[in-house]
Image (tube, rainbow, N blue to C red):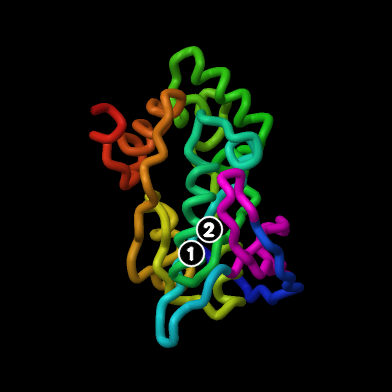
Amino acid sequence: MPQPGPATVRSRVRIPLTFPDGYRAEAEVFTFHGLADGAEHLALALGTVPEGGTPLVRLHSECLTGDVFGSERCDCGPQLRESVERISEAGGYLLYLRQEGRGIGLYNKLDAYALQDSGLDTYDANTALGLPEDGRDYTAAAQMLAALGATGIDLLSNNPDKAAQLAGLDISVRHRVPTGVHLSPSNVRYLTAKVERTGHSIELSRLVG
C-alpha cells in the first residue's frame, strides 16, 4: 500500500453535540488540507487523553440513512452515539469519513438494499451491482491521525480490516476495542454477514440466540 503524503490541519472549531436520547458532548472539529482522496473528512476531538495515554479512535464511515434518519437496517447510528460517549470518557478522536455504503455511495447503497430484499446479503448485493464488497480506503484517515499527532492509538472497531490498513499506513494500533452489539429485527442478517464474511468481532450468539 503506498504511503500517504502529509496532511495539515486546515481549521478547528468547537461544536456542542446533543443526541436524540439527550446525551451531550463537546467536540473540537478539525478539517484538513492535503487528504489523499480530496474528500471533506472530519476529525472530532472528544474528551481529554490522560498524560502519557493512548487516544481511543473510531473510524466512522458516513451513513445518511443510519446516522441521520435512524434506519434500523444497519447499526451505524447506534455505533456513532456509543462512540461519542466512549471516546469522550477515554479521550481521543472520532473520524467521520465520507464513505457512504462502505465506499459505494448513497444511491448504490439503496440499490443494494433492494437486492438484499430479494435475498442477497450485504456483500453479495454489492458485487451483483459490479461494485466492491468493501471499497473503503483508510489512507486519508491515517493522514488525519498523523496530522493530529495520533500515530499510536486504540481503535474502537469490530472490523479487522481497519486495523490492518492503518498498520500498513504507519499508524500503530495497540488494541482493537469492539463496539457493542446494536441489534434490531431489521439488521440481524446484515450483522451476521459481517461476522461470517469479514470476521467482524460481534458475538454471533447475540444475533441468532
Q: Residue at x 49, y 59 (%)?
A: 85
- Residue 31, image x, y percentages: 71, 67
Q: Residue at x 61, y 76 (%)?
A: 147
Q: Residue at x 36, y 42 (%)?
A: 181
Question: Which secondary structure, mark 1?
Answer: helix
Q: Which residue is mark 2?
A: 84
The question of residue 109 being in magenta is answered with no
Position of the C terminus by quadrant: top left
Q: Which residue is mark 1?
A: 87
Q: Which residues are magenta?
A: 18-45
How packed mark 2 is, by other alpha carbons closer than 10 Å (few <14, some 14-19, many 20 or more), is: many
- What's the amino acid at mark 2? Val
Q: Nearer the viewer, residue 30 or 193?
A: 30
The question of residue 23 being in magenta is answered with yes
Q: How many marks?
A: 2
Q: Residue at x 60, y 31 (%)?
A: 109
Residue 140, image quadrant: bottom right
- Residue 155, image x, y percentages: 41, 63
How packed mark 1 is, by other alpha carbons closer than 10 Å (few <14, some 14-19, many 20 or more), is: many
Q: Nearer the viewer, residue 14 or 167?
A: 14
Compared to residue 113, the image places residue 63 above or below, namely below
Q: Does the image show residue 3?
A: no
Compared to residue 163, the image places residue 126 above or below, namely above
Question: Which secondary structure, mark 2?
Answer: helix
Cα gap from disc 2 to disc 1, whole angstroms = 5 Å
Q: Verify CB contact (< 8 Å) between mark 2 and mark 1.
A: yes
- Residue 60, image x, y percentages: 54, 52
Residue 33, image quadrant: bottom right
